[in-house]
Image (cartoon, coloured by chain):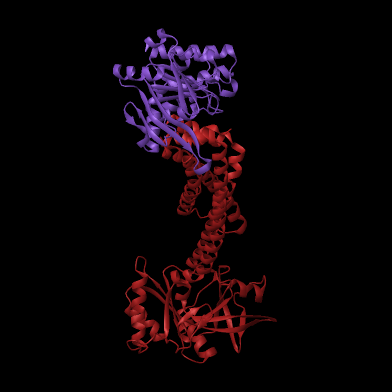
Chain colours: A purple, B red
Amino acid sequence: MTGAASGPEERTQAPPLVELRGVTKVYGSGAAAMRALDGVELAIGAGEFVAVMGPSGSGKSTAMNILGCLDTPSAGSYRFRGLPVERLSRDERALLRRGHLGFVFQGFNLLNRTTALENVELPLIYRRVPRAERHARARRALAQVGLAGWETHTPGELSGGQQQRVAIARAMVTEPSLLLADEPTGNLDSARSHEIMALLTGLNRDQGITILMVTHEAAMAAYAGRVIQFLDGRVTSDSRPDNDQAGQG
Amino acid sequence: MLGNALLLAIREIRRNALRSTLTILGIVIGVAAVIVMVTLGDGATRAVTTQIESLGSNLLVIRTGQHMGPGQSSSAPAFSLADAVAVGRDVAAVRTVAPSASEPMTAIAGNANWATTVTGTDNRFFEVRNWTLEDGRLFSEADLRSGRAVCVIGATVRKELFGSLDPLGERIRLNKLSCEVIGLLLAKGQSTMGSDQDDLVVIPLRTLQRRIAGNQDVTLIQVSIHDGESTERAKAEIERVMRERRHIGRGEQDNFSVRDMKEIATMLTGTTRVLTALLSAVAAVSLLVGGIGIMNIMLVSVTERTREIGIRLAIGALEQEVLMQFLVEAVALSSLGGVLGIVLAIGASIALAGVLEVPFVFNGRIVLTAFLFSAAVGVVFGYFPARRAARLDPIEALRRE
């Protein structure tokens, strides 16, 4: 119930970056219909670092797909910076992702047999950034995640932790307003996981990038300023364990 | 974006070098086959045309009857010497007129005999048909005027009747007529119709008319026209003069024909062209098969790269950008096949032209057409796989291993 209390509080301060209202997602139809999300209400302000937790099948991945503009709700509305995403076309949503979103996946999802630099450059290519600037920005992003000197290595030549750093560099090189991370540490050992979390925390703190991260490890969620729990397609708790972090935004 | 898509496509093609090579093999073979067929066909046509031109430049042939094709003509009254004179006098474009009449006969010298064609004409015949005298002399005024029994013989007749002996001054018997050999013609070789051009005996027209045929007929009038004159106009003029002389009324069909060498060449090269077109069509089918090969590989590629497509879509690639990427890749593949096919075709054409003894004729248009066609194959057969890639659901695509 704390979530319900913080919602209006956010809204009075500033318009939220993203806002879900009564979002429902149903897969299939008839008797086989599966309600993945059931009237989710959620608002996230600019500059927040939010961890999303919940067991498998709780709807957190579906919520992430909708927030990432990869999917649309069956009912309800999703506003991104006040823009009604559910009414946008497939291409308009692609342009929204291109311009404002960054993705980090559990499986890294880098292009195989493509160098780290080329991977990081990819979103800039779609943004039509000129070649020279593209190279410079991609190099800077790689240096920022501690991979200076690894530009010409392909994913196959990098460790898991390094691959995830390349993925983070790719997500942040466009300076997105929202970075969505789907279990970014799911495939990494604990030392590597903490390095990645430190990196994300730094991005949130130093560059003011809003981060929404799905995790099922409490140790990782502890890095976030706000933790949202999903269960059976609903938000069951919304807490800010560390007021210090929340104040940073 | 297009340049970038091209870069990506080339990178992808090089990454799968072996598979790409095998994929484009169909296109390579198809393009090469089409170009080789057309090039060799052009060469054969050129060979025919060159040979016909060697018969005489600006040559018009007036025959009796309507000449339908080699060996086919409807019967009609013969010409007379006066017809030939009239053509030379009334048609301005005419340079030389050579009237002639021919009879198939057996020529006998000593105990050798040879079936050949005896042509009665005058010295202008040698001029319009580009004959060169190898030895001896042509007819004198007196030979022609009084119809003397003298003859000029072709290389084949000479070989058959005299072997290695010198025929000049020797005599050839044509039926009851005994002719003195006064000149030898330089060999010309086979004609396009496969007949031996050197198999001929030429005697004065009057000699033939009086002492062999026993009439005043002229069966063939060969006309050369001045350089730069329009063959078409000269033809029309000659037709007008001849219709008048032969009393052919308006609306009636000509009972003679005037043909230029270009027409005869077209007639003779017709078969070659049809054959070339047919073989090229068969070769073009392999281009189609090559295109299907490309579609197949592009579909495999889309399936293999589902996750890559998912990543691109998630990052914000538009549907048309993904479509373009795969389309460019398919077109790059097929165009590469086209280029390799062209290189292969030119090499093969030069080699085959040498073996088949036809001239190598570089046909820039068919090379360009083949290349554009190969690129078009890429567009057509690449579109379906590319669209499939572009329409993928990014969430599904990312989940795929």
Q: Can residue A127 be spotted in the picture?
A: no
The reply to whether residue A245 is in sight is: yes
Name the spot of residue B135 as percent of width and height, x first.
56, 69
Could you say which is closer to the camera, residue B44 or residue A141?
A: A141
Q: Position of residue B215 (x, y in %)?
A: 49, 91
Q: Position of residue A70 (x, y in %)?
A: 44, 32
Q: Residue at x 42, y 80 (%)?
A: B257
Q: Is residue A15 left or right of residue B310?
A: left
Q: Nearer the viewer, residue B47 or B379?
A: B379
Residue furthest to the bottom in view is B214
Question: Position of A47 compared to B206: left or right?
Answer: left
Q: In this view, does B318 lie above or below B116?
A: above
Measured from the top left, where is residue B150 in percent x and y? 54, 81
The quarter in which the N terminus of chain B is drawn is top left
Q: Nearer the viewer, residue A216 or B61?
A: A216
Which residue sits at x=31%, y=21%? A15
Specify the quadrant that holds the C terminus of chain B: top right
Q: Which residue lies furthest to the front in this view?
A: A1
Query: Looking at the picture, does residue A196 appear above or below residue B323?
Result: above
Task: Name which residue lies at 37% across and 35% down.
Answer: A86
> Which residue is rendered at x = 47% and y = 37% of the image?
A26
Quarter occupied by residue A42: top left
